[in-house]
Amino acid sequence: MTGPDERTPAAAPAGPTPAAATGPTTAPDGYGDGTRCVHAGLPAPEPGQPFLPGPVFAAPYHLGPAGPPPPGGNGYGRPDNPTRRLLEAAIGELEGGDCLAFASGQAAVTAALLSVLRAGDTVVLPADGYFEVRRFAASTLTALGVRVLHAPTVGPYPELSGVRLLLLETPANPGLDVCDVAGLARRAHAAGALVAVDNTTATPLGQRPLDLGADLVVASGTKALTGHSDLLLGYLATREPALLDAARAWRSGSGAVPGAFDAWLAHRSLATLDLRLARQSANAGAVAALLSGRPDVAAVRWPGLPGDPAYPVAAAQMRRIPGIVSFDLGSADRVARFLDRSRLVFAATSFGGLHTTADRRAQWGDDTPPGFVRLSCGVEDTADLVADLTAALETG
Ligand SMILES: *Cc1c(COP(=O)(O)O)cnc(C)c1O
């Protein structure tokens, strides 16, 4: 029964097996991760009813003759949907806070930014985090009179007095650097700033930012959280009623809600999160060991690899390490040859899905080197994946 709060920083293990990736899978709530995922957000059992009720499709609902429904009832689909509420209960249980689901991760991030920030405020964003957030800040936040600063995930962080919101992304996508959330939250709170953590890469089974002192969690549910590469989803979680109310009002005002079918699919997929992450993480450990042993592959990063710069903080802060490995093959040509030869790795963007995928990030115009690859390990058998990658890299 070891939760993140009780863990002491782990010393680097002697062997190549990463401690954090095989660490405890029991969360503070008492039950293990598998049990929590299977039961998250389910209604009380009722004879003749399914475990997870099917999606409810409605724009308006019947109203009683006396007018609008009470809070938590159903009046109109933008604020009210029972399928979405069950998904929010599930994610909220896993994150340890109240949750709001959004149409995409980007919608959740922008909801956090725009429901907190006002003209004259300062926000600090990760310099190496999800590029679309920086693009949105440059185009929209700046035009609204918000001052935007950037800090690399590993730091150094600027003086935080006068800052309204510090957004962290750990592990950062795509470079996989990590930061000490509890330490930064203490610094930010002492300076009067709020802290939001983008928990997309870790998922709530990897770390619970609200337990570490963050005020807000934002994330894309499109990636490992749902993991089937078949929907877009985002969410925000918090324990602060005022932040929740502001974000809910923003969501209703902007209309950035997920559809009922996507919410239902997401909830169905959540039940296997523990199983999927376990295999993805084990595959990433094997792939990172393979790649870091090859002289023809540079800059291999996986936070569970002893010796990785992110390892000490990840081992102390995270309950499991994500299935993403990044590395540099030196040129766009070599990445193309690698993808052409591999029989198991799909060329695709996004990450966290059942299928192993590789994304040469520079093709999207972000600021990574031309041969930089973000490999997202799926749930294939480890031996098959290692053999396939070995063969695909063999002839350069
Ligand atoms: C993908 C991603 C987002 C955006 O999520 P969408 O669901 O694609 O809108 C935000 N943050 C991180 C870290 C991501 O990887």
Image: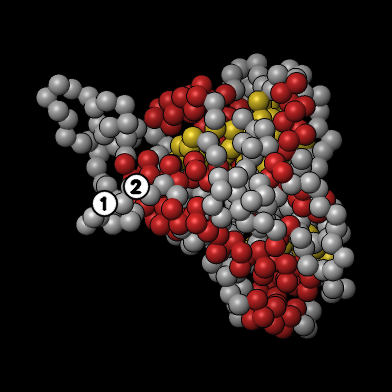
Residue 68 bears which disc, if any?
none
Q: Position of residue 284 (x, y in %)?
A: 69, 66
- In the image, is 151 to the left or to the right of 85? right
Q: Position of residue 130 (x, y in %)?
A: 65, 45
Dots 2, 1 in contact, CB < 8 A = yes
Above or below, comparing residue 297 to residue 26 in the picture? below
Q: Can residue 259 be seen in the rendering of this structure?
A: no
Picture mark count: 2
- Which residue in the structure is indicated by mark 2? 43
Q: Position of residue 285 (x, y in %)?
A: 73, 67
Decide which of 385, 173 is in the foreground and name it: 385
Label 1 neighbour load within 10 Å: few <14, some 14-19, many 20+: few
Q: Residue at x 32, y 39 (%)?
A: 81
Q: Residue at x 61, y 17 (%)?
A: 119
Farthest left residue? 65
Label 2 neighbour load within 10 Å: few <14, some 14-19, many 20+: some
